[in-house]
Image (tube, helix red, strand yellow):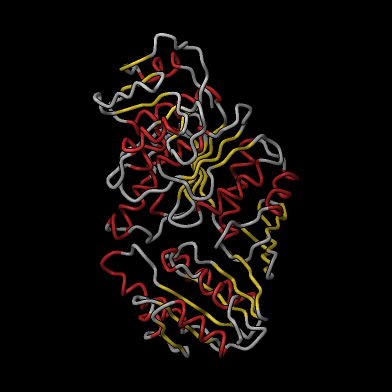
């Protein structure tokens, strides 16, 4: 997105600390917050956080060809710049400029949040809506306030539908994202135990997720799963839809295909699991509201492909790995295990790791996963991590505990027979992709 200096001043009501006499205000430029990605004649916007300060790189930005820069510090004037803009808070300035872009392009905005399933739902939404509309979406999982700005700053001018993923770690964060994006549709995919460490209770998590409607358009639509925690906390007077698997019939699940009937139509998705059907229902309702044809909805769902570390299949050395280790909480772990056990033939192996951000009851949650696993048989369990060992110690399954990924990978290499399908499930911090890499790169010599 290109700006000129007059636009910036009018949008932010900011102060110009310095400007070369020869500078013309109608010159167009882009804004960059990263000196490593900054292009010559960009304007540098230094962000300041708890553990970093972009103001320390203003001189570097000018060395890299920056036209000018923003600053929160009035004394930071380097006359090598064509101009210097003073703002009280550079992050707020970034957000205000993002809102300006949102209003200027004026796309139809769909916002999605949830304890789990939000990124999958976002990707499904994109796959469906791009069949009929010029669509832009949040990149990967860049779902905080900086990610929102990045998304809006990279939105093409001809975008018709913008899909924004919203993450949070505390109360108030979803409200902020909603206020700066002004959604037409707000979606909550789930409320679960993720972020208990920070928010303390499931009730607080539900309240935080429901902030998505704080700036939802009055004539818009809220869509959520049929969950009493959401219904209790959703404060929206406009139209609301609550989806439920109880309204789905004729479910047929295979390894790479799931069929189901919903409201008189048969849909197919390329991923197994009822939780993926639940995500798809949210997408179907959003698409129907916006006028996407049934044919395009079906095509988009069938074209959906998961992003990295979400049910990602890798085959190496005769072993098939299903890597779903992008993130993990008790709800997602039990759902993925249930699906894995139902769709893959034996021999199977479960490799489970620590689940993060579960608060004071984190050991209890891991124990409960162990108890859940006792419902299955004829499958071996390997755990990695200090918390995951409580899974192994509270199940009837045959199990082994490992301190790290390397020891686990060595066991798999030496002891797991070919043709075994292996599920990897843990929180992102466990870096379970390393297990696949170690098996793949093992030197027999």
**Residue at the (67%, 68%) spot, across then down:** 253
Q: What residue is shown at x 39% (from left), y 31% (from top)? A: 45
Frontmost residue, 173 versus 314: 314
Please identify the quadrant where the C terminus is shown: bottom right
Q: Nearer the viewer, residue 47 or 66?
A: 66
Residue 338 in the image: x percent, y percent? 54, 74
Residue extending furthest toward the right? 295
Extreme-top residue of the structure: 21
Residue 441 occupies quadrant: bottom right
Relative to 26, does residue 206 appear above or below in the rendering?
Answer: below
Q: Nearer the viewer, residue 341 or 206?
A: 341
Q: Quadrant of the N terminus?
A: top right
Identify the residue at image location x=65%, y=47%.
Answer: 127
Q: Can the viewer see residue 6?
A: yes
Q: Quadrant of residue 371?
A: bottom left
Locate residue 77 relative to residue 353 in the image: left or right.
left
Percent coordinates x, y for residue 41 in the rendering: 50, 26
Does 444 sit left or right of 355 as displayed?
right
Whole-percent x, y for residue 146 in the image? 41, 40
Residue 221 appears anywhere in the view: no
In front: 272, or 261?
A: 272
């Amino acid at each position: 997105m290109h700006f000129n200096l007059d636009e910036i001043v009018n949008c932010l009501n900011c102060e110009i600390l310095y400007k070369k006499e020869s500078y013309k205000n109608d010159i167009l430029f882009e804004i960059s917050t990263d000196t490593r990605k900054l292009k010559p004649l960009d304007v540098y916007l230094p962000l300041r956080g708890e553990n970093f300060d972009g103001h320390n790189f203003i001189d570097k930005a000018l060395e890299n060809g920056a036209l000018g820069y923003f600053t929160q510090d009035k004394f930071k004037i380097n006359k090598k710049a064509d101009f210097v803009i003073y703002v009280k808070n550079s992050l707020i300035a970034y957000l205000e400029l993002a809102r300006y872009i949102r209003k200027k392009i004026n796309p139809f905005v769909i916002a999605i949040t949830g304890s789990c399933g939000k990124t999958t739902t976002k990707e499904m939404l994109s796959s469906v809506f791009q069949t009929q509309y010029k669509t832009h979406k949040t990149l990967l999982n860049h779902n905080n306030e900086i990610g929102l700005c990045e998304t809006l700053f990279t939105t093409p001018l001809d975008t018709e539908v913008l899909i924004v993923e919203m993450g949070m770690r505390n109360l108030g964060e979803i409200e902020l994202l909603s206020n700066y994006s002004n959604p037409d549709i707000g979606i909550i995919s789930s409320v679960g135990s993720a972020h208990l460490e920070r928010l303390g209770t499931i009730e607080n998590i539900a309240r935080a997720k429901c902030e998505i409607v704080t700036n939802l358009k009055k004539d818009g639509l809220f869509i959520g799963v049929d969950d009493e925690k959401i219904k209790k906390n959703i404060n929206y007077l406009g139209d609301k839809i609550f989806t439920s698997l109880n309204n789905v019939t004729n479910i047929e699940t295979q390894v790479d295909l799931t069929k189901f009937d919903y409201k008189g139509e048969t849909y197919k998705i390329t991923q197994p699991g009822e939780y993926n059907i639940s995500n798809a229902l949210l997408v179907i309702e959003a698409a129907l509201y916006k006028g996407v044809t049934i044919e395009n909805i079906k095509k988009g769902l069938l074209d959906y492909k998961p992003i990295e570390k979400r049910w990602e299949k890798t085959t190496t050395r005769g072993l098939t790995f299903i890597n779903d280790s992008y993130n993990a909480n008790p709800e997602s772990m039990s759902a993925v295990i249930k699906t894995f056990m139902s769709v893959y033939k034996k021999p199977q192996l479960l490799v489970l790791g620590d689940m993060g951000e579960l608060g004071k009851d984190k050991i209890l949650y891991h124990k409960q996963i162990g108890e859940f696993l006792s419902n299955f048989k004829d499958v071996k369990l390997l755990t990695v991590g200090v918390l995951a060992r409580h899974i192994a110690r509270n199940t009837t399954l045959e199990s082994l505990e490992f301190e790290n990924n390397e020891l686990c990978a060595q066991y798999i290499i030496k002891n797991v027979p070919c043709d075994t399908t292996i599920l990897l499930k843990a929180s992102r911090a466990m870096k379970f992709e390393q297990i696949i890499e170690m098996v793949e790169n093992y030197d027999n010599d």
